[in-house]
Amino acid sequence: MQFNVRMSEVDVPVSQTAELTYLGRLLDALEMVSTEIPASSYRDAAAVLGVPPSTAHRLLSLLSERGYCERDDGGRFRPGSRLYGIAMRALDQLPQWQGAKRVVYDVGVTTGESASFGVLIGREIVLTARHNSAHALTAVANVGDILPPHTSALGKAVLACLPDEQRRALIARFAPETASEILGSLQGELDAVTATGYSIDEEIFSPGVRCRAVPVFDPQSGFVGGLSVSGPAVRFTVELADEAIPVMRKAADGLVALVTRQWRTGKTETTSERIKRRSYDRHA
């Protein structure tokens, strides 16, 4: 990949201190859009960054032009696709993330179908690790894909770990006008995920594709994700799909330990137990 960097387009000399100050503000703006800070206007962003609105406008416009920033339906600044790409490449170099990829690979090989690991990042579920089946007929997905929370098994596994307000916000990214109605229709399925520890998709996300998923959840760190196995319904029968569930459950606890760097000693609280406790706390 080649980068063409233009240090300055102005004709007058700029002091090194001024350049560093501007670069520092640009980095501050980049950090702002990657957090949950609610800046929905240039004036809001200026207040957060401690700069004039005109400066906030220049900084965020530059980030938007380069694909590092965009605005959601409510006008709030959020990470753009290019920033997500950098984040994924950075994660890929972490030792524990390499371990996560190996876990996903092992799940795929054990089940003979495609395995996916998705992580909740902001208000989107991002596919962060993938093993594609060796079969000629397979379910296709790629690292970096944004998964719909309300139609995919992995998405519903993630939703089951969240409070209603956050569930609604995730669904609204795909269906802003009907998010509340969709969440209401999913309540029975999400309760079932809490009770059983897994979610199902019978050709809803993609015709002809069957999927099972389990949450990957750690309340101490706030990490929320999901692990799924999917394949063509003609080959990945209901019986085979259900047989993949215990494989994924075991892998999910390994993934929690890897991505949070918390190998626990003694009795380990499983992902299913964590979800049930979180659900109890939410309704208590």
Image (tube, rainbow, N blue to C red):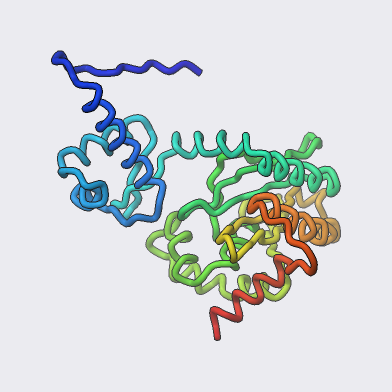
* Residue 143 screen position, x and y as percent: 61, 39
Left/right of residue 159 with respect to residue 106 in the rendered view: left
Q: Residue at x 25, y 22 (%)?
A: 16
Q: Is residue 44 above or below residue 91?
A: below
Nearer to the camera, 260 or 203: 260
Quadrant where the C terminus lies?
bottom right
Residue 278: image quadrant is bottom right
Residue that sits furthest to the bottom in the current view: 284
* Residue 13 screen position, x and y as percent: 16, 15
How many numbered discs, if any? Answer: 0
Q: Residue at x 66, y 75 (%)?
A: 276
Nearer to the camera, 100 or 180: 100
Residue 9: image quadrant is top left
Residue 144: image quadrant is top right
* Residue 232 screen position, x and y as percent: 75, 47
Nearer to the camera, 94 or 273: 94
Left/right of residue 36 with respect to residue 219 in the rendered view: left
* Residue 204 screen position, x and y as percent: 63, 57
Q: Residue at x 65, y 58 (%)?
A: 153
Left/right of residue 173 with respect to residue 162 in the rendered view: left
Residue that sits furthest to the front in the current view: 17
Q: Residue at x 48, y 72 (%)?
A: 164
